[in-house]
Image (tube, rainbow, N blue to C red):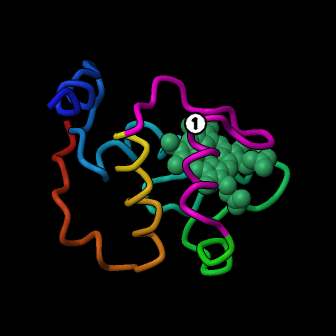
Amino acid sequence: MLMGLLIGGCGGEKYPPTSWGLYLNKCARCHEADGSSVTATDLGDHPVDLRDPFFQRGITDAEIRRIMIYGEGRMQGVSGLSDAQADSILLQVRRFARPGASALDFLPPES
Ligand code: HEC
């Protein structure tokens, strides 16, 4: 019951608190909307691509959550992520492994 409040409580974010919207708000700045992670690859010390099947197969859900919250290498943890938000973003990260699936998602209009 508190969860809706926690997720909805981040005022000023551009996109709604769906799994896709949270990803756009919190991650797309460095990992791009399509997961290609062009910016993160520039910032980091190795190529990053969230769509890469080797990346997707080689990492557990728990590891992705840990990276989101605590960071890894050149990536700082994203501050202020609730557990529920991290779970929700995790769904989007996994969705990059299955191109096309996100076409069914709600895509917020550009403002
Ligand atoms: C300010 C830029 C920035 C933001 C914001 C950011 N990341 Fe990153 N991320 C990076 C960089 C840079 C790396 C490469 C880190 C390194 O040097 O190993 C990375 C690495 C990762 C990795 C490991 C990829 C691999 O190939 O090992 C995952 C998973 C990841 N980020 C997920 C996320 C998620 C999910 C979010 C949103 C909650 C997010 N990141 C937000 C910059 C960012």
Residue furthest right in the image: 45
Q: Residue 75, percent across and down?
A: 70, 39
| Up/down of 20 relative to 101, above or below | above
Q: Name the residue rendered at 26%, 26% in the picture.
A: 6
Left or right: 80 in relation to 48: left
Q: Name the residue rendered at 82%, 58% in the picture.
A: 46
Q: Nearer the viewer, residue 109 or 81?
A: 81
Left or right: 7 in relation to 38: left
| Region in magenta | 59-83
Q: Residue 98, percent across and down?
A: 41, 80
Q: Name the residue rendered at 19%, 27% in the picture.
A: 2
Name the image quarter holding the N terminus: top left
Q: Which residue is mark 1?
A: 69
Name the image quarter holding the C terminus: top left
Q: Classify mark 1: helix, strand or loop.
A: helix
Q: Is residue 91 magenta?
A: no
Residue furthest front in the image: 1
Q: Name the residue rendered at 64%, 45% in the picture.
A: 67
Q: Can you tell me whether the CB of the residue at mark 1 lies under 8 Å from the nearest atom of ligand 1?
A: no
Left or right: 72 in relation to 92: right
Q: Nearer the viewer, residue 45 or 78?
A: 78
Q: Is residue 30 visible?
A: no
| Up/down of 24 relative to 60, above or below | above
Q: Is residue 11 visible?
A: yes
Q: Is residue 79 magenta?
A: yes
Mark 1 surroundings: few (<14), some (14-19) or many (≥20) residues within 10 A: some
Q: Residue 25, percent across and down?
A: 38, 37
Residue 5, by quadrant, is top left
Q: Amino acid at mark 1?
A: Ile
